[in-house]
Image (spheres, rainbow, N blue to C red):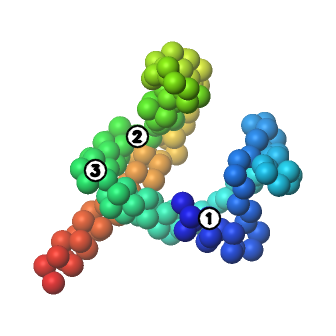
Amino acid sequence: ADEVQRLLAAAPGWTVEASVCVDEKSGACQAQPSGASMQLAAVNLSPKDRADLLAGIGKLAREREADSNFDNFTQWLARKGPLPYLVDGANVGMYNQNFQESKFNFGQVERLMAHLRPGAREIQKERRAQFGGLAAGAEVVAASVRASAAGAAGSEAA
């Protein structure tokens, strides 16, 4: 985290803050502790930049987890996608549970899922039409996983 913070702090136009309150409709932000106001904006990635980002995520996932199932996950995503949403139930269930008697909150996960379900089928139909039945980006992840695995096997043999 410190390495990423130093990298972004050194980059022109980037700001590193401890926390930010975001207005979900407008993208307007109020940063803490500086109090700076800013506007979030979408970043459009080229296909190459997207592939590089996904390959980097895959590399980190495999390096940091001894028994990583990342490769299996990306293959599953390529078969099942495109998914309108991918919910990280562990983080949703533990959100705001930082007190002594805290526990995993299944109700939080259920409420989020109930909120997302109504629009999910329509979004999935649109994405399948747009991406020809493949998960948006999942084929790139799967390809980068295969390339990374092949590269790792080649470097071990050398």
Which type of secondary structure does the marked residue at label 1 adopt? helix
- Viewer-nearest of discs 3 and 2: 3
Residue that sits furthest to the left in the current view? 157
Locate residue 156: give its quadrant.
bottom left
Quick check: 100 left or right of 134? right
Q: Residues within 10 Å of mark 3 (few under 14, many from 20)?
A: few
Residue type beneath disc 2? Gly
- Viewer-nearest of discs 2 and 1: 1
Residue type beneath disc 3? Ser
Q: Is residue 51 visible?
A: no
- Label ID, residue 68: 3
Residue type beneath disc 1? Gln
Counting from the top left corner in percent of width and height, residue 86 is at: 47, 36
Locate residue 151: give its quadrant.
bottom left
Which type of secondary structure does the marked residue at label 3 adopt? loop
Q: Residue at 51% across / 15% down in the picture? A: 107
Q: Quadrant of the N terminus?
A: bottom right
Q: Residue at 85% across / 51% down in the picture? A: 35
- Label ID, residue 81: 2
> Which residue lies under the disc numbered 1?
5
Q: Residue at 23% across / 71% down in the picture? A: 152
Quick check: 48 left or right of 71? right
Q: Quadrant of the C terminus?
A: bottom left
Counting from the top left corner in percent of width and height, residue 27 is at: 78, 44
Q: Residues within 10 Å of mark 1 (few under 14, many from 20)?
A: few
Q: Residue at 24% across / 65% down in the picture? A: 149
Depicted 95 relative to depicted 137: above or below: above
Residue that sits furthest to the front in the current view? 100
- Label ID, residue 14: none
